[in-house]
Image (cartoon, helix red, strand yellow):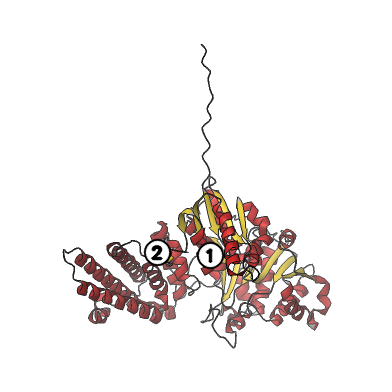
């Protein structure tokens, strides 16, 4: 009898699906696409799924579809309506959630950090969750370190040293040494087109129309072959008319081309290597970063330049040195000083240089622009460090401010603490004013160290008491009261010295997301949070010591803290 040989093909292993939730605006989706591209480069074996709102993702599907394997569009407008009532709307929402859960999701990642996305993330079935979601007890849960950091620091101040794309990538967990960023110039060395986007979502974030009129007039007057294309939405038409209907532009109308309301895909196709982009921080700048179009971004008002700079190399970001910049959306401002601190003369000079050489020369700036105008601005060039993080290189200032120095310190600390990435930065140069600020912060760092050590001490006391055969509840409550007092003092410290705000804010978020289901595990988790902040303060102290600004001993400066606790 002849045996029949059967060929057996091993079953294909199903790809693991990573679902990314990004239900905020177009610019955020574009930044998420950059992070997803990094994920695909580093892990091509993963299948990626984007969950986004229909109104924001549809206009940029031509980019999203190149990045994600699958896209689920959520239509909240049709889902929640008066016709269906409360029950019907809930049913509609659950139907959309079922579409998501029809996919076997290995990991779901919430990059939106809004209340809506947090609830949505709670309903998604996945083996692992990164980013905020609600527990069954309706407590907000943020388990991973990078998400805790993003939630605690971004939009709370201007001491975040990371671009949002890098933060998203860190949450996803990719190695950015393998990156899609290119050092090759896309824009020609000599360009004859400018794409201008002089609009923004808030008045705080955009220049007055008269300044843009001056920029357009001077550039067209000095560059005979130049054409300026103005992009925006239909809602920007009134502002557009104020810019171009100025009498000084009467002879240049044939050189100014409106592109208001143009579909995003058409705008993307139209901008080629002959273009320079100039405008405020916006969706358009993030869109053109996918082509590496040469750009000059003007950051004003609430914009955090480092966080929201277009994710591309060798581009420029212009921002004011105004003390109150950046501010918050609810901050009242009668006179926009940050707008006044950026002169149109400086913008014209930088634009002229970029049109002809793709770079901005410090020597030309100092020769052509008055020190009065240069001293009120920062000009940063986007570059990348050895671990693939997008960073800023200041074009005109060799000396760093106290905030810039602390941002560098935090970049080193958080990168190693959360991802074990080893960074080496050059010793900064700084002036006398910065020296005084750094010396004042040494005392705050010492206080932070002492408070975190006391936090460790009292959490350890609680653990020791719990381990006794008959724990003393009164004593445990007393220790807990001491811990509450320490946390209040940490808040006071952060208010007194804003340079330590990121460390205190992170500790607060980490403490609200302790791991464990009983008092022992929760207390142990709290101990490790205090340990982490103690380590951060020790490293900060060592950094300050290396700068030569430590002039007194910890013992003398922290005596009052120990006395009060």
Q: Whole-percent x and y of residue 309? A: 58, 67
Residue found at x 54% / y 83% = 331
- The residue identified by callout 1 is 117
Residue found at x 31% / y 66% = 526
Q: Quadrant of residue 289?
A: bottom right
Question: How many marks overall?
Answer: 2
Q: Quadrant of residue 403?
A: bottom left
Foreground pick, 159 / 36: 36
Residue 551 visible somewhere in the drawing: no
The residues bearing labels 2 and 1 have C-alpha atoms spaced at a distance of 29 Å
Residue found at x 23% / y 65% = 463
SS of the residue under disc 1: helix
- The residue identified by callout 2 is 413
Q: Whole-percent x and y of residue 404? A: 47, 72
Foreground pick, 378 / 519: 519
Q: Is residue 40 left or right of residue 553?
A: right
The quarter of the picture where the C terminus appears is bottom left
Foreground pick, 370 / 196: 196
Neighbourhood count class around disc 1 (C-alpha, 10 Å): few under 14, some 14–19, many 20 upward: many
Q: Whole-percent x and y of residue 14? A: 53, 42
């Amino acid at each position: 009898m002849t045996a029949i040989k059967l060929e057996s093909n091993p079953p294909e292993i199903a790809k693991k699906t990573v679902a990314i939730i990004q239900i905020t605006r177009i610019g955020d989706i574009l930044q998420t696409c950059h992070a997803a591209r990094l994920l695909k480069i580093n892990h091509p074996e993963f299948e990626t799924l984007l969950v986004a709102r229909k109104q924001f993702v549809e206009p940029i599907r031509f980019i999203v579809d190149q990045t994600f394997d699958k896209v689920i569009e959520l239509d909240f407008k049709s889902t929640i309506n008066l016709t269906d009532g409360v029950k019907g709307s809930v049913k509609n929402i659950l139907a959309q959630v079922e579409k998501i859960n029809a996919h076997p999701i290995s990991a779901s990642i919430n990059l939106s950090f809004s209340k809506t996305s947090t609830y949505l993330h709670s309903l998604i079935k996945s083996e692992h969750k990164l980013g905020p979601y609600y527990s069954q007890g309706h407590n907000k849960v943020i388990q991973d370190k990078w998400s805790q950091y993003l939630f605690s620091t971004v939009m709370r101040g201007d001491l975040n040293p990371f671009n949002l794309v890098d933060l998203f990538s860190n949450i996803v967990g990719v190695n950015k040494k393998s990156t899609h960023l290119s050092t090759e110039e896309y824009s020609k060395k000599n360009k004859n087109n400018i794409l201008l986007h002089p609009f923004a979502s808030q008045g705080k974030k955009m220049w007055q129309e008269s300044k843009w009129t001056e920029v357009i007039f001077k550039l067209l007057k000095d560059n005979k072959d130049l054409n300026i294309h103005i992009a925006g939405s239909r809602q920007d038409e009134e502002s557009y008319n104020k810019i171009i209907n100025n009498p000084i532009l009467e002879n240049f109308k044939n050189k100014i081309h409106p592109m208001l309301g143009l579909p995003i895909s058409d705008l993307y196709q139209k901008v080629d290597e002959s273009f320079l982009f100039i405008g405020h921080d916006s969706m358009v700048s993030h869109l053109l970063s996918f082509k590496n179009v040469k750009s000059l971004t003007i950051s004003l008002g609430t914009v955090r330049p480092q966080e929201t700079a277009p994710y591309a190399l060798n581009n420029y970001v212009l921002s004011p040195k105004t003390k109150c910049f950046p501010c918050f959306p609810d901050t009242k401002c009668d006179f926009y000083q940050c707008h006044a601190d950026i002169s149109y003369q400086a913008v014209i000079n930088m634009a002229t240089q970029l049109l002809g050489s793709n770079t901005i020369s410090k020597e030309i700036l100092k020769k052509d622009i008055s020190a009065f105008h240069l001293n009120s601005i920062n000009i940063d060039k986007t570059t990348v460090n050895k671990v693939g993080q997008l960073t800023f290189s200041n074009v005109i200032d060799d000396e760093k401010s106290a905030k810039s120095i602390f941002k560098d310190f935090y970049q080193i600390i958080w990168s190693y603490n959360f991802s074990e990435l080893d960074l080496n930065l050059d010793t900064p140069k700084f002036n006398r004013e910065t020296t005084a600020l750094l010396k004042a912060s040494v005392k705050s760092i010492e206080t932070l160290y002492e408070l975190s050590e006391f936090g460790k001490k009292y959490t350890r006391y609680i653990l020791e008491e719990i381990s006794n055969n008959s724990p003393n509840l009164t004593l445990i409550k007393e220790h807990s009261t001491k811990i509450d007092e320490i946390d209040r003092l940490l808040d006071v410290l952060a208010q007194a010295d804003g340079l330590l705000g990121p460390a205190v804010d992170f500790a607060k978020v980490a403490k609200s997301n302790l791991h464990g289901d009983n008092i022992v595990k929760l207390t142990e988790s709290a101990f490790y949070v205090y340990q982490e902040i103690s380590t951060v303060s020790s490293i900060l102290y060592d950094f300050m010591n290396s700068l030569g600004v430590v002039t007194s001993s910890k013992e003398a400066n922290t005596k009052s803290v120990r006395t009060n606790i």
